[in-house]
Amino acid sequence: MGQQGPDLFSSDIGYIMRNEYKFLLSFGYHPEDVLGFFKNYFLDESSTKSEQNLFWLIMARMQVNYGNLLEEVKQNALKVIESEEDIKQWEEYVIIEKHVNTPVKLINEINMTDVVFNPDNPEEFSAQFVRRFDEVKNSNAINLLDQSNIPSLVKEYLNNDDFSKIEVFGEDAKKYLKKRKIVIQTLHSDIIDFEPQKKYFAKPNFFDPEWKIGDIYVSLVKKENDKNQHLNEYYYDKYIMFEVVDINRKPISRIIPSLAAEVTVFIKPFMYLDDKLPNLKDIEELEYTYKSRINFGDTFERLGKFDESKQEIYGIFFYNSKRKLKKMDLIKIRDGSGTESEQEISGIGCGHIFVDRINITIAIHLKHLFENQKKQN
């Protein structure tokens, strides 16, 4: 359970709980139902005392923020706060930092001394490293970690890879301890002064476009969609064409995977730009667009070189884009089988784009491809 700072939501579990809580509330679940889901998901017989404490603190912080603090959450959070168990654990982190960080830093410095990588002789580098490591094992830095008066907590940290530790070693440890005390004190005050509030939670606008693998679509490039005017008049009012090659549906909730999914559709554009719809018979003869080494800019020279051996693939986001998708007036000219593609999705050429940017993005890429062909000829 990683912890990157003193804030409750800077922990791994805090980040997950906050996202899940907002999702479930926005889909109409009552706070009591959500609490039950959370207890079943995050707490079990293997949960440590510190993990349980953190759970109730995070739960209280969220419910206070969202105006629906439940009595069970309130009492458990107050119990953790008033016992000072959370603060005591953070004080232990400072002890660990004192006994672990300085020797480990020294060991790292020793490891780097006189060990120089030679690409022409990697075997010698390996031999140097092994010799240096043997020296380190016998050094005073290691002996610092073997003192008989070392705290048991530190020994547990050194001997257990699964130790639930904070990631703020070094000079920040004491500073973060002070901030953590303020975080807990503020939460305590907010719980005591809490008054229920009714808040509205907008439902996330996730939707499934119901595209299938193998579908082929065409769409018109419209000038009004090219906000930065990347294209000249020749490229407007012409059709581009692409094929759906893979679909990734990722559940937005770990707790209720069936709730909704974030959909990313991967497409491959064709080398097609025309003012009329393509003939299905001619599709098999068309080539896909190929990738360029992207360097941000708007000219061919700055865009980079093209690699004709690699096909261009775009990942399309559909979040909050239902209306935009309808405005695109996509025309399906081939119905795909929906079966998994043999195409391995890797090295997306232009990264991910939103669905309303498909036309312009593909047209811009075609423009640079055509310029590239002219230069080669």
Image: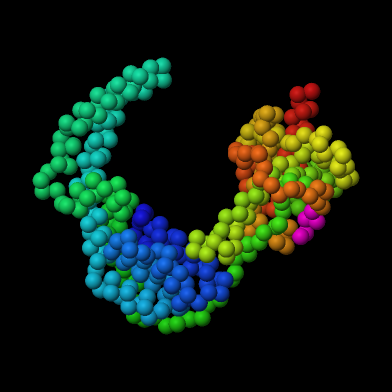
Task: Name the spot of residue 166 as percent of width and height, x first.
Answer: 31, 54
Give the residue drawn at x 68%, y 38%: 312
**Which segment is the magenta one?**
326-330
Query: Would residue 327 be counted in the magenta stretch?
Result: yes
- Residue 10 visible in this rendered orientation of the protein: no
| Position of 45 relative to 231 (above/below) | below
Looking at this rendering, what residue extends furthest in the bottom direction? 195
Quarter occupied by residue 44? bottom left
Q: Residue 18 versus residue 279: which sits nearer the camera?
A: 279
Q: Nearer the viewer, residue 169 or 311?
A: 311
Q: Residue furthest left?
A: 148
Would you say 216 lies left or right of 107 here? Answer: right
Q: Does residue 126 belong to the magenta stretch?
A: no
Q: Determine the residue positioned at 26% across, 48% down.
A: 160
Which x, y percent locates residue 157?
24, 49
Tell me, what colour scheme is on the image? rainbow
Residue at left offset 35%, top offset 19%:
123
Judging depth in this view, the residue of 233 and 93 nearest the camera is 93
Answer with the quarter of the image where residue 85 lies: bottom left
Residue 335, x across and y down, in percent: 79, 50
Q: Return the residue nearer the eye: 330 or 90.
A: 330
Quarter that holds the C terminus:
top right
